[in-house]
Amino acid sequence: MISTSPILACKGCGRTKPGPTGDPTDLFPSESCGGCPPWTCGDCGEACSAKELCSCWVRLDTLPLADVKALFAADGTLSFDPA
């Protein structure tokens, strides 16, 4: 069994979490966190932050699975063919 040490620091502001929370930032440093100041999105020009995403982002965690599949199928990146 491989053991990993948590990486809890934010690359943007250097904040650290007191301990693992079960999200991906436990193992990989975050580029930004909820404590980082907002930045201007290079695509839409709106303010964007880890807490408040700009309109370029689509939150998949709030969509039904069928809608998530449809999003990826629409651009050809979803494939169920293992070959």
Image (cartoon, rainbow, N blue to C red):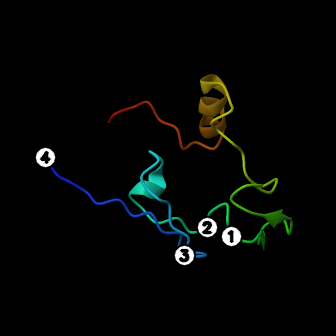
Crowd tier of the residue under label 1, counting other residues whose Cα lies within 10 Å: few below 14, some 14–19, many 20 or above? some
Image quadrant where residue 32 sits: bottom right
Find the distance from the CA under tag 3 to the CA under tag 2.
9 Å
Find the distance from the CA under tag 2 to the CA under tag 4.
31 Å
Q: Secondary structure at mark 1?
A: loop
Question: Which of the pair 75/44 is nearer the observer?
Answer: 44
Find the distance from the CA under tag 3 to the CA under tag 1.
9 Å
Disc 4 residue type?
Met
Q: Position of residue 19 (x, y in %)?
A: 43, 55
Q: Secondary structure at mark 2?
A: loop
Q: Which residue is mark 4?
A: 1
Q: Which residue is mark 1?
A: 36
Disc 1 residue type?
Cys
Q: Which residue is mark 3?
A: 14
Crowd tier of the residue under label 2, counting other residues whose Cα lies within 10 Å: few below 14, some 14–19, many 20 or above? some
Q: Name the N-terminal-most of marks 3 and 2.
A: 3
Q: How many marks?
A: 4
Q: Position of residue 42 (x, y in %)?
A: 76, 72
Q: Position of residue 26 (x, y in %)?
A: 42, 55
Question: Which of the pair 76/55 is nearer the observer?
Answer: 55
Q: Name the N-terminal-most of marks 4 and 1.
A: 4
